[in-house]
Image (cartoon, rainbow, N blue to C red):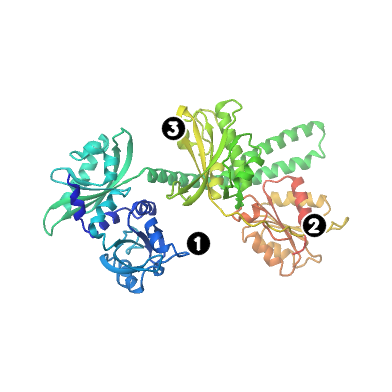
């Protein structure tokens, strides 16, 4: 193999190979990081999506780091108009364009610009363009060095002999030094026939193609890779050479598996949501009437009613788990110091926290609950009172290591060791009702997994030696807020004894309306009832006494509870509202961020909690 041939490649050849990498920013970032020359990826609005160290050092050092930089901050308007805009509008590359650029000291320098539109399989025109700047004194001789320092595998294949004519340093690392005479021996035996067929098809048809397969590395390990193959041939002649870009697919395959798992869990969550909604109403009716009858029953009947109530409470707990899986309690995300909060949580774990702060963005209450669930999971697997270790480390995520997870600086919280980790555990631990035995188990860690994802965190179970594992929770890095000034506490008016307030109960479920009305009438309230929003408005037309409180389900047959409250407040501006429901889309209800005079009670609720919440809403400050 003649490596000197690489120095004779034109900028267009190298840029074409680099542009073959699929349009995912994680790959471009890897390439840009390794470039020894200034390079950047610019978006259609001329903002920089990614720049490497050389580009930042030479052209952006004098600009504020916190500002969003654009191509107009560095390049002259003529350069943008003649070389970059055509890359987007006509997908036209510019190669070896002579330009003048001011460096960080304001000194003009002569540079050669390559502007290459990056392919986008989802759009007719490119949305990103790769910019590579080379000093005039460097010329094209530095391009081989660019390829050698790239972490992406780039190589040339002679289709006639099957030998690799050129490979950069990354190709040596992936394929091995002795493979260039017969590279196909590195292909997994189960994939060799399929890969050979694709390469033959590219050679015969003269068209580009991609193939994904397993590669056996020199250290005997196996990794998934993807080859993008481009034939090089003269006009009307057969293919003379194949240019290939090989990218490792481990992250992508893991990400794809996460996405498939997320879709399956979402479908299960929708089913669980509807089932839980129906059971919530049923359990509340059973438990509520059991409480009502218990006061007037004899001793023998009271014992039977207690058994009914106990079964109902068991059903309510199972329904609550289904609801947490279908729609985890809303995360109240805020910025806080993880190192400061962890020691205050009752985790019974061995903390090994590095010095300094760890500002993260998360819901501390839900994160505390999640860690407790993970610790209980580990102890159940060990069968002993296991003391786990918790430590943290800062990291930067350049790729979507989990579907939907944020890219950028994170704090990784590590919890372990988790004993007895099998391959099935790694793949399915966060699925509902997962078990490795025939025993029926509760919903498990599915709600914990979804709750962490809801607050912007990512979690995965990493297997380790001796069948042990470690939970890795990646939390977005945040900026801690300034200390807030204490707000003055408003006095809460006391309830006037003996007052007979009027309450309007609106719910499409007749049994629930009757139960709520019966409880409130027994406590001295005057109760009106309606099944729909239209019935509620009609019941107030001939009502001489103003309604003080509206109790309404969030989802009525003909309107939402918020809409009904808004209509009634036109004529009753001081109306208080208590929303009840088991299906909640607005997180404001679950985290208590409601305006004065409003409250929320999640079904199923007990008679005691209903009475307490009604009084709390009625005694709250006016709107």
Q: What residue would you read off at disc 3?
A: 423
Q: Nearer the viewer, residue 444 or 18?
A: 18
- Dividing the picture into quadrants, the one containing residue 320 is top right
Q: CA distance from mark 1 to mark 2?
A: 48 Å
User: What secondary structure is marked by label 3?
Assistant: helix
Q: Earlier in the sequence, mark 1 or mark 3?
A: 1
From the viewer's perspective, is 615 left or right of 427? right
**In contact (CB < 8 Å): disc 1 and disc 3:** no
- Work out which quarter of the rendered image holds the C terminus and state it: bottom right
Res. 238 visible in picture = yes
Q: Nearer the viewer, residue 298 or 200?
A: 200
Q: Earlier in the sequence, mark 2 or mark 3?
A: 3
- Dividing the picture into quadrants, the one containing residue 375 is top right
The image shows residue 228 at horizontal and vertical percentages of 27, 50
Q: What residue would you read off at disc 1?
A: 66
The image shows residue 587 at horizontal and vertical percentages of 61, 54
User: What secondary structure is marked by label 2?
Assistant: loop
How busy is the neighbourhood of tag 3: few (under 14 within 10 Å), some, or many (20 plus)?
Answer: few
Q: Residue furthest top?
A: 384
User: What secondary structure is marked by label 1?
Assistant: loop
How busy is the neighbourhood of tag 1: few (under 14 within 10 Å), some, or many (20 plus)?
Answer: few
In this picture, is 438 found above or below 578?
above
Q: What residue would you read off at disc 2?
A: 619
Q: CA distance from mark 2 to mark 3?
A: 56 Å
Residue lying at 65% horizontally and 52% vertically, measured from the top left: 591
How busy is the neighbourhood of tag 2: few (under 14 within 10 Å), some, or many (20 plus)?
Answer: some
Mark 2 or 3, closer to the camera? 3
Q: Nearer the viewer, residue 618 or 7?
A: 7
């Amino acid at each position: 193999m003649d490596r000197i041939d690489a120095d004779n490649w034109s900028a267009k050849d190298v840029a074409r190979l680099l542009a073959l990498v699929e349009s995912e920013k994680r790959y471009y970032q890897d390439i840009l990081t390794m470039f020894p020359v200034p390079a950047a990826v610019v978006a259609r609005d001329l903002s920089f999506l990614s720049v490497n160290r050389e580009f930042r050092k030479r052209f952006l050092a004098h600009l504020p780091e916190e500002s969003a930089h654009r191509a107009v901050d560095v390049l002259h308007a003529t350069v943008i108009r003649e070389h970059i805009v055509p890359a987007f509008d006509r997908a036209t590359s510019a190669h070896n364009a002579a330009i003048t650029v001011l460096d960080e000291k304001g000194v003009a320098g002569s540079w050669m610009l390559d502007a290459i539109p990056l392919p986008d399989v989802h759009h007719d025109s490119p949305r990103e363009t790769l910019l590579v700047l080379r000093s005039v004194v460097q010329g094209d001789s530095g391009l081989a060095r660019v390829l050698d320092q790239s972490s992406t595998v780039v190589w040339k294949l002679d289709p006639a002999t099957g030998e690799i004519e050129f490979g950069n340093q990354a190709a040596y690392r992936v394929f091995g030094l002795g493979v260039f005479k017969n590279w196909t021996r590195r292909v997994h035996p189960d994939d060799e026939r399929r890969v050979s067929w694709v390469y033959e098809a590219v050679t015969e048809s003269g068209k580009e193609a991609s193939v994904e397969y397993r590669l056996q590395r020199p250290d005997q390990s196996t990794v998934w890779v993807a080859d993008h193959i481009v034939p090089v041939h003269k006009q009307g002649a057969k293919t003379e050479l194949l240019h290939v870009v090989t990218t490792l697919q481990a992250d992508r395959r893991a990400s794809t598996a996460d996405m498939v798992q997320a879709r399956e869990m979402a479908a299960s969550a929708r089913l669980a949501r509807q089932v839980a909604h129906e059971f919530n109403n049923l359990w509340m009716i059973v438990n509520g009437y059991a409480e009502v009858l218990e006061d007037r029953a004899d001793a023998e009947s009271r014992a039977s009613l207690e058994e009914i109530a106990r079964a109902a409470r068991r059903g309510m707990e199972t329904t609550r788990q289904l609801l947490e899986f279908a729609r985890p309690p809303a995360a109240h995300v805020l910025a806080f110091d993880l190192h400061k909060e962890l020691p205050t949580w009752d985790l019974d774990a061995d903390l090994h926290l590095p010095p300094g702060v760890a500002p993260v963005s998360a819901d501390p209450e839900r994160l505390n609950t999640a860690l407790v669930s993970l610790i209980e999971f580990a102890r159940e697997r060990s069968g002993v009172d296991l003391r786990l270790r918790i430590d943290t480390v800062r990291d930067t995520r350049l790729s979507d290591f989990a579907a939907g997870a944020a890219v950028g600086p994170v704090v990784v919280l590590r919890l372990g060791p988790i004993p007895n980790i099998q391959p099935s555990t790694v793949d399915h631990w966060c699925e509902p009702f997962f078990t490795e035995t025939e025993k029926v188990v509760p919903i498990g860690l599915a709600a914990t997994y979804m709750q962490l994802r809801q607050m912007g965190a990512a979690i995965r179970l990493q297997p380790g030696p001796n069948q042990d594992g470690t939970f890795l929770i990646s939390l977005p890095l945040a900026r801690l807020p300034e200390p807030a000034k204490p707000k003055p506490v408003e006095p809460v008016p006391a309830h006037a004894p003996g007052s007979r307030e009027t309450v309007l109960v609106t719910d499409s479920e007749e049994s629930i309306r009757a139960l709520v009305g019966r409880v409130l009438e027994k406590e001295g309230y005057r109760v009106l009832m309606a099944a729909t929003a239209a019935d509620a408005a009609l019941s107030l037309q001939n009502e001489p006494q103003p309604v003080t409180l509206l109790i309404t389900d969030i989802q009525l047959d003909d309107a939402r509870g918020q809409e009904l409250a808004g209509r009634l407040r036109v004529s009753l501006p001081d109306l208080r509202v208590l929303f009840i429901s088991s299906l909640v889309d607005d997180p404001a209800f679950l985290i208590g961020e409601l305006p004065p005079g409003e409250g929320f009670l999640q079904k199923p609720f007990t008679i005691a909690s209903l009475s307490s919440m009604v009084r709390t809403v009625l005694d709250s400050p006016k709107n």
